[in-house]
Image (cartoon, rainbow, N blue to C red):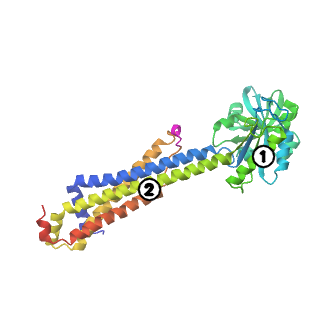
């Protein structure tokens, strides 16, 4: 295989038949290029759907209140449903074996000041479990503890962008800021992987917000995570039971969809998983079809090449070339063209995906990429197919009698 004469003959053959070599190479390169782009775009689409669930835990249930749309048990249409801390306690005590983490939330907007730097920030009062529900990454300091909640500590956890605004690159941990005329201590700084807009938020203990700023136990919404051991159907069944229990508690009609809104992310994930499964099958079929098209193309070209070189092969046999050497030469030329063209197609495909980056986010494609091993495997499949495609007609041509080959037009 590594004989100098063999390499020389192959390169001479390619040089004399440049158009034939280019056409063969283009067939392979285009197949691998299309294969790479196709799987890269599919992965980009999958990355987009995964990013939808990245900001929060993957087993979150959101509970929000609204207004009644139907009269029921004394409640008139348009009555506003208001959650209180006792409703948070109700859920926590009623479903201890089905909930993993749970937190009530109170939303405020405050002006925060530190040494002349001031700005308005969205402030969310939460329980200690909120860190795990939101997947909050604490970069410096720490999150709230249950003890902080019980003692109604005047502590704040600020987003990275808030820290940049107020402290200008200085370490904010342990510093005190003025919030509505009250001194609060910074105990931590957090970052958000999915959306940096969240980094303009501030968190405080919910008990502190209720006692200082509200003077009541009103809460805006509740978030919880269900037991991760539940499958999709069990999780959806739990959220339905939770919805019915809350409707009974607030005398809301069973078919009223606006008074109490419970959204289980399991429903979205289940639908997304189904869609991605179907998409994966479609991409697999198209990718397989692309490879088949490449195999058929290289096979047809190899048959044509061998037929075209009948006289040359006849002359080689007259000069003493063995059938094995003729077969090996054609086979090696086929493998060489397929490998080089496949590698070029792979480089162009990966380079195109890298160049696109996140420019296709408007089309729900985020960071399109493809595993190099997958593309190499596809290239190897084409190389093997090209070898088989070249071997069959080459072996047939090697057996032809010299006089027959020389008499061909």
Q: Is any part of residue 19 visible from this angle? A: yes
- Left/right placement of residue 98 relative to residue 324 reads right
Image point 74% across, 45% down: which residue?
131
Cα–Cα gap, marks 1 and 2: 48 Å
Depth check: give the residue in front, 2 or 235.
Answer: 235
**Which residue bears the numbered disc 2?**
375
Quadrant of residue 167 in the image?
top right
Quadrant of residue 243 in the image?
top right
Depth check: give the residue in front, 81 or 222.
Answer: 81
> What SS does tag 1 mark?
helix
- Left/right placement of residue 234 relative to residue 283 reads right
Boundaries of the magenta span: 361-365
In reply to whether residue 307 is colored magenta, the answer given is no
> Residue 15's spot in the image, x, y percent?
22, 56
User: Is label 1 or label 2 in front?
Assistant: 1
**Which residue bears the numbered disc 1?**
242
């Amino acid at each position: 295989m590594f004989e100098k004469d063999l390499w020389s003959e192959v390169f001479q053959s390619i040089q004399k038949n440049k158009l034939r070599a280019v056409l063969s190479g283009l067939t392979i390169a285009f197949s691998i290029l299309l294969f790479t782009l196709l799987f890269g775009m599919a992965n980009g689409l999958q990355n987009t759907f995964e990013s939808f669930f990245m900001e929060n835990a993957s087993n979150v249930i959101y509970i929000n209140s609204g207004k009644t749309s139907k009269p029921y048990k004394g409640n008139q249409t348009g009555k506003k449903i208001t959650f209180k801390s006792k409703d948070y306690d109700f859920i926590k005590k009623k479903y201890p074996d089905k909930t993993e983490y749970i937190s009530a939330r109170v939303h405020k907007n405050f002006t925060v000041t530190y040494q002349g730097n001031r700005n308005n920030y969205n402030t969310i009062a939460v329980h200690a479990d909120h860190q795990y529900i939101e997947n909050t990454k604490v970069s410096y300091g720490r999150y709230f503890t249950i003890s902080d909640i019980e003692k109604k500590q005047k502590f704040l956890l600020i987003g990275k962008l808030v820290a940049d605004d107020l402290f200008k690159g200085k370490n904010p941990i342990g510093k005190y800021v003025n919030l509505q005329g009250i001194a609060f201590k910074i105990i931590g700084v957090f970052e958000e992987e999915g959306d940096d807009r969240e980094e303009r938020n501030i968190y405080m203990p919910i008990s502190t917000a209720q006692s200082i700023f509200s003077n009541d136990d009103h809460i805006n919404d509740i978030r919880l995570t269900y037991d991760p051991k539940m499958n999709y159907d069990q999780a959806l069944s739990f959220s339905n039971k939770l919805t019915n229990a809350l409707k009974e508690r607030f005398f809301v009609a069973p078919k009223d969809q606006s008074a109490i809104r419970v959204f289980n992310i399991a429903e979205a994930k289940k639908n997304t998983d189904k869609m991605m499964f179907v998409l994966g099958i479609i991409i697999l079929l198209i990718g397989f079809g692309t490879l088949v098209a490449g195999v058929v193309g290289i096979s047809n070209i190899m048959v044509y090449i061998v037929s075209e070189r009948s006289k040359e092969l006849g002359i080689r046999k007259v000069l003493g070339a063995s059938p094995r050497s003729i077969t090996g030469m054609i086979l090696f030329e086929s493998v060489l063209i397929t490998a080089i063209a496949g590698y070029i197609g792979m480089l162009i495909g990966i380079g195109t995906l890298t160049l696109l980056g996140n420019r296709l986010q408007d089309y729900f494609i985020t960071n399109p990429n493809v595993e190099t091993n997958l593309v190499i495997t596809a290239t190897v499949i084409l190389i093997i197919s090209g070898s088989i495609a070249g071997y069959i007609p080459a072996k047939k041509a090697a057996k032809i009698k010299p006089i027959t080959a020389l008499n061909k037009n």
